[in-house]
């Protein structure tokens, strides 16, 4: 039995205001869905766009779905909004693979316990309800690999690989990353997750 363990760092550009980033994480049996939307600009309009698409992803998502199909569904909710960049990763521990589709400046990568890094590239642009070119990308994902997803308000510290591949829990890893990273003046979201093998009782 595996369980998906994850942790999130989420802040806004100005203290005490809503972040223009939104996110959604959920586990469906063998698949963990991890997504971040960063609304264009900042303030309420940015928030509004990011929230719309994240709510749509949440509504439409199923464990066996495809991230590109979800991007398309979500895109429809953005007509008339300012627009948003979005990344959606689905990590299937049974098939040992991750599927990813992203538009715009969202970074997604996996790292193995031996520090082998592999990036899942987002297509350029942003979503605002108009047709877009999306690509679904795939990578193998083994137990104890870590998935990392973040918006452009995050710049990982130089030693991030060592921190992430430590045997610490995701929550502790996030705390250490945040403590050591350079702060950027932007809304920021960072999610790290891994499928953890539960010991049989
Ligand atoms: Mn941003």
Image (cartoon, helix red, strand yellow):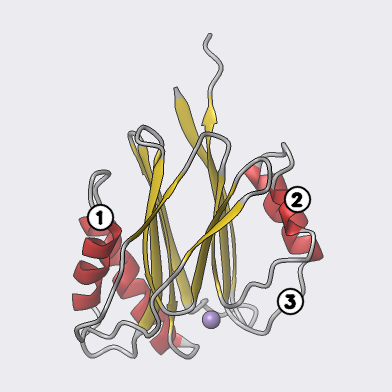
From the top left corner, tell me how far across and down residue 186 is, in percent: 61, 82
Against 87, is 80 above or below?
Answer: below
Eye-nearest disc, 3 or 1: 1
Give the Cα distance between marks 1 and 2.
31 Å
Is 57 left, or right, of 171 in this rendering? left
The dot on residue 183 is 3
Look at the image and tell me in which quarter the N terminus lies. top left
Give the Cα distance between marks 3 and 2.
18 Å
Q: Which residue is mark 2?
A: 163
- Mark 2 within 8 Å of ligand 1, using the beta carbon: no
Counting residues from the start of the chain, the first of labels 3 and 2 encountered is: 2
Q: Which residue is mark 1?
A: 66
Q: Residue at x 22, y 83 (%)?
A: 129
45 or 41: which is nearer to us?
41
Against 38, is 139 above or below?
Answer: above
Give the Cα distance between marks 3 and 1.
33 Å
Against 80, is 190 above or below?
Answer: above
- Label 2 secondary element: helix
Dots 3, 2 in contact, CB < 8 A = no
Is 19 left, or right, of 104 in this rendering? right
77 or 160: which is nearer to us?
160
Q: Is residue 91 visible?
A: no
Is 35 left, or right, of 179 in this rendering? left
């Amino acid at each position: 039995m595996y369980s998906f363990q994850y942790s999130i760092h989420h802040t806004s550009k100005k203290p005490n205001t809503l972040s223009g980033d939104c996110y959604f994480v959920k586990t469906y049996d063998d698949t963990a869905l991890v997504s971040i939307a960063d609304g264009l600009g900042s303030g309420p309009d940015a928030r509004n766009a990011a929230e719309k698409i994240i709510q749509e992803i949440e509504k439409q998502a199923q464990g066996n779905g495809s991230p590109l199909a979800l991007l398309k569904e979500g895109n429809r909710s953005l007509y008339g909004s300012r627009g948003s960049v979005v990344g959606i990763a689905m990590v299937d521990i049974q098939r040992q693979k991750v599927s990813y589709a992203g538009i715009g400046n969202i970074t997604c990568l996996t790292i193995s316990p031996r520090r082998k890094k592999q990036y899942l590239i987002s297509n350029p642009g942003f979503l605002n309800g108009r047709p877009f070119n999306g690509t679904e990308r795939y990578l193998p994902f083994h137990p104890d690999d870590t998935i990392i997803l973040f918006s452009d308000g995050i710049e990982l510290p130089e030693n991030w690989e060592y921190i992430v591949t430590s045997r610490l829990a995701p929550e502790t890893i996030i705390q250490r990353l945040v403590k050591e990273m350079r702060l950027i003046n932007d809304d920021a979201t960072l999610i790290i997750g891994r499928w953890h093998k539960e010991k049989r009782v």
